Image (cartoon, helix red, strand yellow):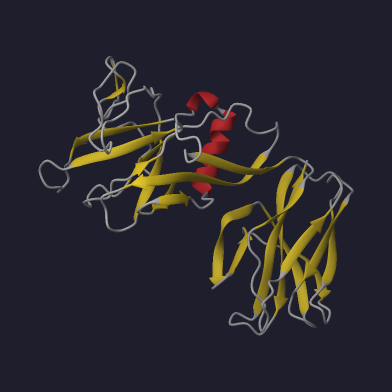
């Protein structure tokens, strides 16, 4: 669900300029299996209308107080709001007429959890930002703290308002997509790097039965730079955004890095490796990425990442 509020502009805005903010919240009760860990997430919106001439950025702030959705439908283009009614959230109220925000305009974390681009019209989705994932993981652990996000643009700029579909627009309403692993699973993550003088990307595939102490996870490398030396590198956890090394190539590992085995890439660009799960290893999410010493601008090519959830 969602709601909007308008108030007189300030902070250098011309007199009479109004500010519009939106609220969005998702019921996450039972959304994930017990013990699951989130590996990525994305908020999707559909911009239906704007009077702006340029794209803008929306900032999502975690709301820290409960609010009421209400049922008022704004007339016309919607930017002017509608007649206030009991149960509405407004600029001053989180539940009209008797429950107020502590701060006019909403009670929310000062630092945005993530941001996303808003086009002039059409669909848009956020990147899998760490703050977005952290909010969801926190709300799953503490459902009473889930009050959703407040979305706002740079309010010192003119003409940035957007009208986005809410949940009543079933086909184009807000969507929250969560990618996760359960204990004992493996998965691929992120994008592989392009290979020199090739239209292929250096690909990592994981093969395994249920992961457990004493089991082994197979690592299969394909479409890599032929006849070179490579290595498997590990980390605890992963960077959901990825650190861009050069155009089209990112690393998804976090520091400190854990060195693994070296391997030889054959003439077809393939190689195999494996990792044994030691006995007694604590439950953790491991990430692995293969690298090959190559004659690229940075002297190596990396695969996509693999994720291993040791129960």
Relative to 53, 255 lies left or right: right
- The residue located at (25%, 22%) in the rendering is 84
Question: x and y percent of residue 169 in the render?
Answer: 45, 35
132 over 276 or under it: above or below? above
Quadrant the C terminus occupies: top right
Quadrant the N terminus occupies: top left
- The residue located at (64%, 71%) in the rendering is 193
- The residue located at (34%, 31%) in the rendering is 107
Question: Would you say residue 94 is visible in this rendering?
Answer: yes
Q: Quadrant of residue 290?
A: bottom right
Relative to 179, 167 lies left or right: left
Relative to 61, 102 lies left or right: left
Which one is in front, 267 or 286? 267
Question: x and y percent of residue 97 in the render?
Answer: 27, 16
Which one is in front, 296 or 231? 296
247 over 103 or under it: above or below? below
Question: x and y percent of residue 184 in the render?
Answer: 79, 43
């Amino acid at each position: 669900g969602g709601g909007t509020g308008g108030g007189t502009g300030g902070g250098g805005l011309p007199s009479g300029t109004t500010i519009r903010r939106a609220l969005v919240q998702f019921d996450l009760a039972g959304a994930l299996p017990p013990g699951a860990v989130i590996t990525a997430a994305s908020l999707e919106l559909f911009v239906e209308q704007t009077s702006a001439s340029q794209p803008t950025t929306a900032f999502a702030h975690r709301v820290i107080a409960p609010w009421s959705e209400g049922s008022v439908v704004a007339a016309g283009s919607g930017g002017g709001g509608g007649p206030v009614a009991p149960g509405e959230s407004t600029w001053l109220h989180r539940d009209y007429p008797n429950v107020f925000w502590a701060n006019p305009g909403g009670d929310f974390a000062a630092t945005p959890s993530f941001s996303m681009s808003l086009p002039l019209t059409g669909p848009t989705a956020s990147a899998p930002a760490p703050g977005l994932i952290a909010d969801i993981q926190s709300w799953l652990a503490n459902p009473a703290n889930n009050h959703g996000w407040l979305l706002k643009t740079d309010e010192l700029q003119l003409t940035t308002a957007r009208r986005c579909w809410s949940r009543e627009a079933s086909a184009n309403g807000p969507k929250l997509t969560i990618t996760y692993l359960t204990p004992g699973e493996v998965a691929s993550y992120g994008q592989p790097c392009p290979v020199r003088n090739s239209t292929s990307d250096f690909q990592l595939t994981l093969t395994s039965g249920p992961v457990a102490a004493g089991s082994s996870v197979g690592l299969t490398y394909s479409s890599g730079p032929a006849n070179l030396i490579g290595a498997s590198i590990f980390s605890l956890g992963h960077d959901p955004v990825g650190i861009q090394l050069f155009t089209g190539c990112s690393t998804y590992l976090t520091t400190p890095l854990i060195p693994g085995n070296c391997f030889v890439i054959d003439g077809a660009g393939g190689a195999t490796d494996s990792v044994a799960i030691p006995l007694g290893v604590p439950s953790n999410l491991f990430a692995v990425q293969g690298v090959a010493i190559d004659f690229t601008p940075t002297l190596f090519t990396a695969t996509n990442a693999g994720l291993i959830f040791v129960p």
